[in-house]
Image: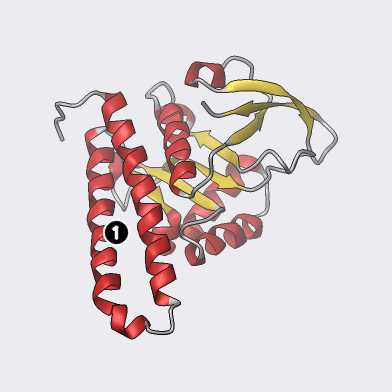
Amino acid sequence: MPSNYSEDELLEAKRQIGSILHKLRETVRALSEKENADRLKSQITLAQRRIQALGIANALIEEAMGVRIWRLSENPAMIGEAAEWFSSKWDIPVEAYQKSIEGSVHCADSVPQWYIVRLGNAESGRIIAGCGIIENDFHDHPDLAPNLCALFVEEEHRGRGLARRLVEHAGSEAHRLGRDELYLITDHVGLYERFGWKYRGDVTDSDGVTVRLYQAP
């Protein structure tokens, strides 16, 4: 889809939509829990329609940016395939990913959340990239949360900006979830600096290995 807007403008639009979606979902949750929820049905329905409309707007923005990022909490039929894909890239049991991703389905407005990119932006396309947002990526500073994790792009699809797009999307999603900060751990030097992330120092992972910790811009 052609666009007359710059990438920065589209990203800012996604951030704003994400913030509004978070507030609308909180409104629906609060109204639904009230004792007189039946009387508030029209307000709840209106908020739900706005959530749907903004979700469509987000999808159109992603299309205009040239890549669609699938949120697995909204696409539970993809969970099994995604869990196997992440497991094959990071040598972590499929069950661990399955449990975390399934948990996101029941908490669409909180951590954890998981995302994938499919070949050709098609639902039938194979997974070519993905990442997640979890509370702690197995390091000794649980106060530095949440964490971007499991970022991976298939080798033949690198150099297209998919890693940058996923990282930027994760930042927007963190704001949508009401989280002001986002961190990650890595042994890469120089990669995340290109995305505007700040090196905060070293931390120790669950294997006792020293790794670099970055904070999102």
Quadrant for residue 96, please give it.
Answer: bottom right
Q: Nearer the viewer, residue 134 or 119?
A: 134
Quadrant for residue 35, please give it.
Answer: bottom left
- Position of 208 with respect to 34 (left or right) is right
- For the rendered model, the colour scheme is secondary structure
The location of residue 98, given as percent across then percent down, is 58, 60
Rendered position, 81 above or below 145: below
The location of residue 139, given as percent across then percent down, is 76, 39
Q: Nearer the viewer, residue 69 or 32?
A: 32
- Position of 60 with respect to 70 (left or right) is left
Farthest residue to the right: give it: 208
Q: Label 1 is placed on what type of residue?
A: Ile
Q: Quadrant of the N terminus?
A: top left
Q: Residue at x 32, y 85 (%)?
A: 38
The location of residue 192, given as percent across then percent down, is 55, 22
- Position of 67 with respect to 194 (left or right) is left
Q: Residue at x 47, y 36 (%)?
A: 171
Rendered position, 12 above or below 142: above
Residue denoted by label 1: 51
- Position of 108 with respect to 1 (left or right) is right
SS at circle 1: helix
Binning the other alpha carbons within 10 Å of mark 1 as few (below 14), some (14 to 19) or many (20 upward) gives: many
